[in-house]
Image (cartoon, rainbow, N blue to C red):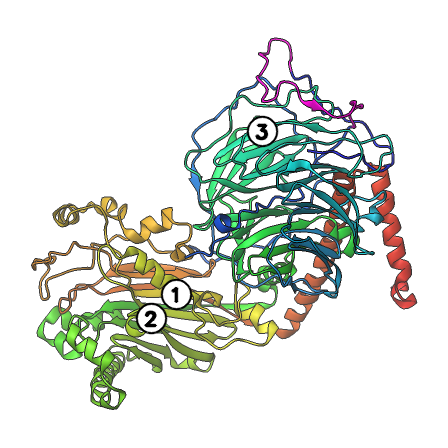
Amino acid sequence: MMMMAPPPRPPRPGVNTNLDPNPPGSISQKRIVSTPTQYQPSIPSRTHVRSMTVDRTSNRVPNEFRAPPAPVSAPTHDRIPERIPERIPEAVPVPSSRIANPGPTVMMAYPDATNTNRSKPYISKGVHEIYTKYDTRMLDVCGELVCTTGGFTRVWSLLDGELLMSLSMGEGQKGTAVVFKPGAHVDDEGTKVWIGNNVGELLEADIGTQRITDSLPNAHGRYEIIRIYRHLTKYGHWTKAEPSMSGGPDESHTPTLSSGPSQSFRVPRGHTFSMVVGDELWYATGKDIRIFKPTVDGKTQFQVLLRALSQPDTGEVISGTLLASDPDSVYFGHSDGKVSVYSRKDYTCQCIMNVSQYKINSLAAAGSYLWAGYNNGKVAVYDVTQTPWTVKKEWSAHENPVIKLIADRSSSYKLDRYQVVSLGADNMVRTWDALLQEDWLEGEMKRKDVEYCEFQNLKVLIMTWNAGASTPHSLRYSESDAHFFRDLLQSADSPDIIIFGFQELVDLEDKTATAKRFLKPKKKEGSDQERMSHQYRDWRDFLIRNLDDYMQGDLYHLLHTAPLVGLFTCIFVKADLRGRISNLSSNEVKRGLGGLHGNKGAIVVRFLVDDTSLCFINCHLAAGQSGANQRHNDVAAILDANVFPSERDPAVRIDSYVGGGDGTMILDHELCVLNGDLNYRIDTMSRDTVVTAVKQGNLIKLLERDQLLVAKRRNPGFRLRAFDELPITFAPTYKYDVGTDNYDSSEKKRSPAWCDRLLYRGRGRIEQLDYKRHEVRVSDHRPVSGRFRFLVKRIDPTRRAKAWMECHQLWEDLRAKEAHAEKYYYLTQVIGYDDATSERLIKEQASRKQMNRSPGRRQA
């Protein structure tokens, strides 16, 4: 690490961060380099505060950036990221002789994705994206300016997208690290950049003149420079093949490449990630993390711990960051989608969070929110103050892997906004709102909806049944079967909405007939479609007759029917509710034969009751004991499909949809119920063992192996984790010998399973009252039903307008506080000013801003 001399800074209180490396009674620790090479005489060490890693991205493009093959209650309040502390305390270093303590066994945990917001947090002013037009793997940001390097080094304005500088790196050379050079004053920041290249050379470029103004040839021999770190006005740089560090201020207090004392140290090969934490360097090689403490004079012991920190159940460390709201912790992203958190005080691993199935290429921190950039091009934002963590947002930020995320601490001071900048392997630079303003406003309005809405409970009955190609006529052969629908309706307590979800109303086991339906020319499809339509009509008419016969005290209207190759959804509503329903729409998602055929898939129906959106999903997923992954994929495809028209009115989006959605996707809706033959089985048990457990009533043993419940516990990417399910207290509903109470005795002897399920998602506004199966023997599946209570709302426009104004005023107050905290952090922790100077600069900036406003606005 080469630490160049800093420009003059206002006086600040001294902080002694160099503790005695060998306290009494300690055992001296072995150094990696016993005698550091000293290029110039040492100078007194300068006290400093918290450090900042400026460049943390690896240049190993082929390997790192491959494309990825309950009671009803008001919703929780979306918080603004916690205000950054006025002063971030330095973590007290552990004596250098200390051996890393592995601590207790670290338990894996999963974030709560129930209320994830999917909207993209675009920045409100300036350009949202910049196309670099060349292969780009490195960038840095300083307020208005973003700099990228590779075959070219280019600088753009984030306000208007103008290209301000473009330098060719020369034949056979490319930039491999870049950082904005510090100025003598905070206002001078962003006038020059330092570039490290693949031949071990450091270059200084002036943005205004677009010229190279200084250079340091052979800074590390001919080895590629892959890192440049900033520590206040000091810098460190890092090579790939021969890792070393150097740095220190000279007598002129001006950071230059060609002068100033320096110091080099050797570290292990195999670097995968590193970052500066306080006055320490946390250095990762694969799973191992080593901690070093470099100094300019080389007198302090370089190696802090005898042993590397490591967690056996995690992948390689490839990213990391520090949260200002959690100064004692260091967060690392791993190649297997996990995040490990270490303490700066005692170096123990505090927790491991299994956040994704994808590689975490980059981490950044904004307030109390942790931003993660993934190998599939998505960015997710986590609130780490909750237990477990909550997924606040997740969206597709890039078409290719996310290479780097930077939370720009300078933007609050220089632009009066807080921005996060991302770089993707698609060579796109994109800018995001670090404060998540739109999310906050939506969350606050939903929290305050009790102030401007009238609420009503609706009773809802939902039945799901794989009918096995049976017909209404089939029910007449058994007295118990014949009374099924009568008993179901009369025990439902006069529901306001009734949903019947059928699967396999046609014989899907007849492979020949199924193939013919798929392959025959369209001109020959008429008779087949007519036959299928006739089956659906029979069931529709049968259900209407049952409602007329057994619900004589209530008048029901048929709201909607929807068929899909065996799937059939039929929805009835009470007559007095029909006039309150709007925006009715339905669609289908085919999953059979790679999404080409509807023998597997889903029917999706949505509508609004007053100002609340409801969505009902009737599914038939992939079959087979070993088909769990295919079922997971089916669920993901169904939930990710754009199945409905987009709602264009921003107010309606906030009022009637959730998660930043526009109504096009299932999870955009406030109240969702998913039913069907989900086909999830019981794993690692023989058929006889399962049957015996069922006879003994030992359902808990079986539910522990249920594929759906196991996936919810163990798979952070399982999409049904966003849904709730009432505890199952009934025997498996599949597979029976038709007409009997015996589980499958055929040659295949399929193991019993809970294939038929009801799951719901309502953010506290759905309450399930019961969950039971019914004894109907005409199919190899048993029907399952559930009674629900839905809370729906009606908005008062006048009161809503008042609440909206109050939310905006509250947001402006919170944003002002956050902006002051960010400016203070930037001036003290990044630039290095003392408290008094920082407060003075903030006040002067506010005064200039006030003077530049119009007289009328100043008086206001």
Please give the label number shown on residue 595.
2
489 is higher (above) or lower (below) than 340: below
Q: Nearer the viewer, mark 1 or mark 3?
A: 3
What secondary structure is the magenta-colored segment mainly?
Answer: loop
| Residue 555 rendering spot, x and y as whole percentages | 34, 82
Asked whether, in this view, residue 6 is left or right of residue 139, the answer is: right
Which tag, 1 or 3, sits closer to the chain's start?
Answer: 3
> Looking at numbered disc 1 in the image, what kind of residue is underneath it?
Ala
Please give the label number shown on residue 267.
3
Please give the label number shown on residue 616.
none
Q: Residue at x 59, y 13 (%)?
A: 28
Q: Nearer the viewer, residue 232 or 535?
A: 232
| Residue 814 rendering spot, x and y as whole percentages | 71, 53
> Looking at numbered disc 3 in the image, what kind of residue is underneath it?
Val
Q: Which residues are magenta?
A: 22-46
Residue under label 1? 637
- Tell me how far mark 1 sits from mark 2, CA to CA: 9 Å
Asked whether, in this view, residue 193 is left or right of residue 753, the answer is: right
| Residue 563 rendering spot, x and y as whole percentages | 30, 79
| Residue 227 rendering spot, x and y as whole percentages | 64, 41
Q: Nearer the viewer, residue 653 or 520?
A: 520
Which tag, 2 or 3, sits closer to the chain's start?
Answer: 3
Q: Is residue 374 visible?
A: yes
| Secondary structure state at the residue bearing disc 3 | loop
| Secondary structure state at the residue bearing disc 2 | loop
Q: Nearer the viewer, residue 193 or 593?
A: 193
Q: Nearer the viewer, residue 555 or 70?
A: 70
Residue 51 falls within the magenta-colored stretch: no
